[in-house]
Amino acid sequence: MKKVIDKKTMTIYIVLEAVLFLAIKYREIISAYDFTMCVLKYLTVVIDFAVALKVWFKWRKGQTFCHDDLIFVGICFIFIADFLLTFLALVMPNEIPGFFTFCIVQAIFCKYLEPGKLNILIRIIFPIVVWIIVYKQNLFTITNAIGLLNITLIVVNFVCSWIKYFGEKSLKNQLFALGLTFFAICDVSLLFRRLTEGLVNEFVRYTVWTAYIPAIMLLTFSFAASVLENSKVNNIDKKTEELNEY
């Protein structure tokens, strides 16, 4: 990993994320949900995106697009989705663009996980069943439908990511699975935050960004690990070609 993300960048990255994490937790405790809070939250995502972009420019720019680059594409759409939910919602109180973009993120990660036919069928049936349940509870709206679609996709991706890891153990797969695990915790917490009151609502209010910040960091590290693994494979292929020529 250190070969892909240099020590200085890694140190600054972790320190900045830790400082922002603590600042967000403090403002949650004092219930300061204002524009400053929005800026702090989005800055965590901006830093993730900046690190991933630096890795891409240094190691992947000009290279043929490979399967693992889908992780970076997913991070790019997370960057867009969070902007839509964080700032666009301030001037246009509509969560649909942000939720829809997060659905695109999960579709990209679905492609990365290379689902089979049965897996795809589950991804179709699962949200439909959830929609029917919500409809019968008279809670069905377009916003809720898209939001629940996103949650069902992330839950299935979370399960599939661990199946992929146990089938092909590697650092990138482990980091990716951990990232989606925290992602799922974040989204499920958001769901409970909408549907519950009292102590449960108070508790999940603190878990959303507690899970979300490490989720995107782990996905960024997963992309860096994939670059490292691909560079090792390419070096082996080059050495093999040289030996064959010899």
Image (cartoon, rainbow, N blue to C red):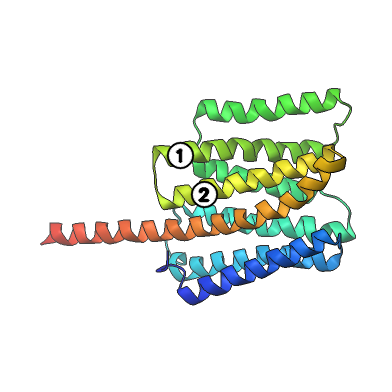
Callouts 1 and 2 close, C-beta under 8 Å: yes
C-alpha separation, residue under disc 1 versus residue under disc 2: 10 Å
Name the secondary structure under disc 1. helix
Location of residue 208 in the rendering, given as x and y in whole percent from the top left corner: 73, 50
Which residue is at the front of the view, 217 or 89?
A: 217
Residue at image point 63% right, 40% down: 154
**Residue that carries the numbered disc 2 in the rendered image:** 176
* Residue 173, x across and y down, in percent: 46, 47
Where residue 191 sits, quadrant-wise, is top right
Vertical position of residue 149 compared to residue 91: above or below: above
Q: Which residue is mark 1?
A: 164
Q: Is residue 67 visible?
A: no
Query: Does residue 194 appear left or right of residue 213 in this picture?
Result: right
Residue 208 visible at all? yes
Q: Is residue 39 left or right of residue 151?
A: right
Going 46% across and 39% down the picture, which residue do you hit? 164
In the rendered image, the vertical position of residue 129 relative to residue 152, given as above or below: above
| Residue closest to the far left | 246
User: Which residue is most to the front?
Assistant: 199
How far across and down, in percent of the image, does residue 38 sit?
Answer: 80, 63
**Label 2 Cα neighbours within 10 Å, binned few <14 / some 14-19 / many ≥20:** many
Assign the N terminus to one quadrant of the image: bottom left
Q: Of all residues shown, which one is farthest toward the bottom?
A: 8
> Where residue 82 is drawn, which disc sits there?
none
Q: Amino acid at mark 1?
A: Lys
Give the quadrant of residue 122: top right
Q: Please state which amino acid type lies under the numbered disc 2.
A: Phe
In which quadrant is the C terminus drawn?
A: bottom left
First in sequence, mark 1 or 2: give its number.
1
